Image: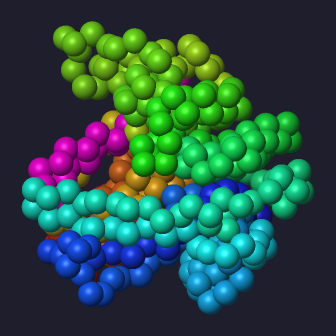
Amino acid sequence: MKKKIVAFGEPLLRLSTNMGERLLQANQLTLNYGGAEANVGASLSRFGYDVYFIGKVPNNSLGYAYERHLQSFGVQTDYLLKGGERLGTYYLETGIGERSAQVIYDRKGSSFSQLTPNEVDFEDILQNADLFHVTGITPALSPVLQELTLQGLKVAKEIGVKTSFDFNYRAKLWSLQEARDAIQPFLPYVDICSCGELDALNLLGIEEADASLDHSQKLTFYYERISEMYPNIKYLYSTFREVYSASHNSLQGNLFVNGKLYQSKVHDINPIVDRVGGGDAYASGILFGILEGKEPEQIVSFGTAASALKHTVHGDSNVFSEEDILAFAKNATGQIVR
């Protein structure tokens, strides 16, 4: 029987400029559908899982197009509600060279942000599930969504479902203090957590690591402190990203389990076709490895390869299968595979 995955988050429409254009110059934009949690769900569906997405879209053409987007990845839309007046949107001014990408959000009053507690029955939806995934973006959207996020995590733990939480802090959605107050109550109910150094410092209030430590030693220090604070969290993961330009990054994956830090090889990604969704592809690769009971070295290698591959295609969601990623992780030289 396929493993059942449930993801909960805001459906989003992305409108992007062409490379080399600023928004103030643009007279046409490229449309993509995504959202952090939906992107993870789409990847996990590609890996062969039975994925359900909880969200809400308007009852119009954009809402139906979003539903079709999910279904094109094999994601089940039984719990994609219809209602409200608008699909959450953001504008991406694509970066190039030394100019970074810029995001403008237009999601206030979206259908998802108007979700009410009586519209989501976690007890029913999470029955027989193997994993519940949510991120820190969802509770940033409304006080009700903070309550629903906590409720979902609690219900999952009560009925024995693994829980996954990605901090995914967005400064344009809420302040550090607001995020700190909302996120910390979630963590006692989390099994698998995506958390970086800045999250440890700014959202969990952990003291700064000794300056004499190298990057990996510092991360280990933070993960050890988090494990002491929340012993229920069995897996912690993140990436080290070196940004040489908007179209040239290097990426290394980190996974902390049983008191030890495991790291992938460094992927040199040049040129980047589309960075959006790279972190979600990494998360889905890590979750896949954990669900499949892989060794830590295999998990972090697979997750980082999945993310590196996502950087090579347009769109928010990863379009690669398990076989594609394993072949890439083994090869990763750019030569033709015949």
Tell me: 17 left or right of 249: right
Residue 278 located left or right of residue 133: left
Q: Classify residue 23 as left or right of residue 87.
A: left
| Residue 93: quadrant of the picture | bottom left
Chosen colour scheme: rainbow
Q: Is residue 254 visible?
A: yes
Query: Is there any visible trace of residue 294 in the rendered image?
Result: no
Q: Nearer the viewer, residue 14 or 333?
A: 14
89 over 199 or under it: above or below: below
**Image location of residue 129, percent across then percent down:** 78, 54
Which residue lies at the image location 33% right of the left edge and 75% below the top edge? 16
State the quadrant of the N terminus.
Answer: bottom right
Q: Position of residue 47 (x, y in %)?
A: 55, 66
Residue 200 drawn in magenta: no
Q: How many marks?
A: 0
Q: Position of residue 126 (x, y in %)?
A: 81, 53
Q: Is residue 255 magenta?
A: yes
Residue found at x 20% / y 64%: 95
Q: Quadrant of residue 100?
A: bottom left
Residue depicted at 15% across the width and 65% down the height: 96
Q: Which residues are magenta?
A: 239-258
Q: Name which residue lies at 67% across and 28% down.
A: 185
> Position of 85 compared to 136: left or right?
right
Q: Residue 61 versus residue 77: which sits nearer the camera?
A: 61
